[in-house]
Image: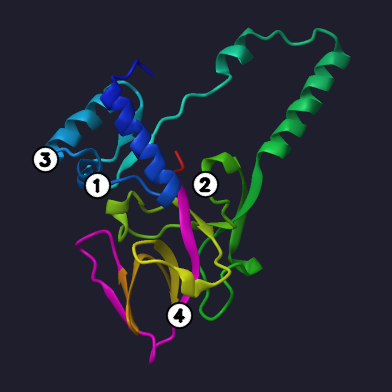
Amino acid sequence: MKLLTPRQQEILNLIRSHIQDTGFPPTRLEICQALGFKSPNAAEEHLKALVKKGAIRMTAGASRGIQLIEPDAGTSSAKSAKSPKSPAGQKLLQTMAKLSQSLQTISLPLVGRVAAGSPILAQQHIEEHFQVDPALFKTQPDYLLKVRGLSMRDAGLLDGDLLAVKKLANPSEVRNGQVVVARLEDEVTVKRFERQGHTVLLHPENPDYPVIRVDTRQEPLTIEGLAVGMIRQS
């Protein structure tokens, strides 16, 4: 990554902090509000500069389509280090590498389609397990959920992405504005949460999709978990 100006570094730090706090990148408007820019165009120009310098990448047409490109710490040292020449030394190195990997990763189940009326982590829903670096998330997730469709496109979530989800000890504590995994009778959906008295609004992040309104006095609603990050498969 090329050297950043102080302003570019400030914006990069803001993006990183926002992702750590919410699980998602900020919009251009949120960057403007945080840094006092008069127009989203100013934020856009700085973001384009960060793309050119290899600090971030952006998904075209998505308001939250910013992704950090973190440098691979240790790449240079790994290249410069010489492997032991003896078979015993090589075997020891392989054993240490496997042990290091097991200590530095967590195993998360990937949930595919969820059958009506059954627990989201039921064995028949789990497609496979992923070894994931826990440092990717401020809050450690309990499972990954495969995103279906484009209703959360402008939050940077595309079809096929893996949403990292944290089960909630007390689902009633979910806050307005958080992205949740919600169960509505036979459907499990990912939406942005808003509570207004006895009514819960589940907002998409795509104008092509409607807001879902739920009267909690008459309709069943279960918050299955809170989004704490995302993994995009290449």
Q: Are marks 4 and 1 in contact (CB under 8 Å)?
A: no
Q: Residue furthest bottom?
A: 218
Q: Residue at x 34, y 32 (%)?
A: 12
Which amino acid, mark 4? Asp
Q: CA distance from mark 3 to mark 4?
A: 43 Å
Disc 3 marks which residue? 39
The percent position of residue 80, horizontal first and vertical second, equals 62, 8
Disc 2 marks which residue? 138
Q: CA distance from mark 1 to mark 2?
A: 20 Å
- Circle 1 residues within 10 Å: few <14, some 14–19, many ≥20: some
Give, as a single range, the part of the protein colored magenta: 203-231
Residue 30, labelled with which disc? Answer: 1
Q: Earlier in the sequence, mark 3 or mark 1?
A: 1
Which amino acid, mark 3? Ser
Q: Name the foreground residue: 200 vs 82.
A: 200
Which amino acid, mark 1? Glu
Of tags 3 and 4, which is closer to the observer? Answer: 3
Q: Is residue 142 above or below residue 46?
A: below
> How has the structure been colored for display?
rainbow
Q: Residue at x 58, y 66 (%)?
A: 125
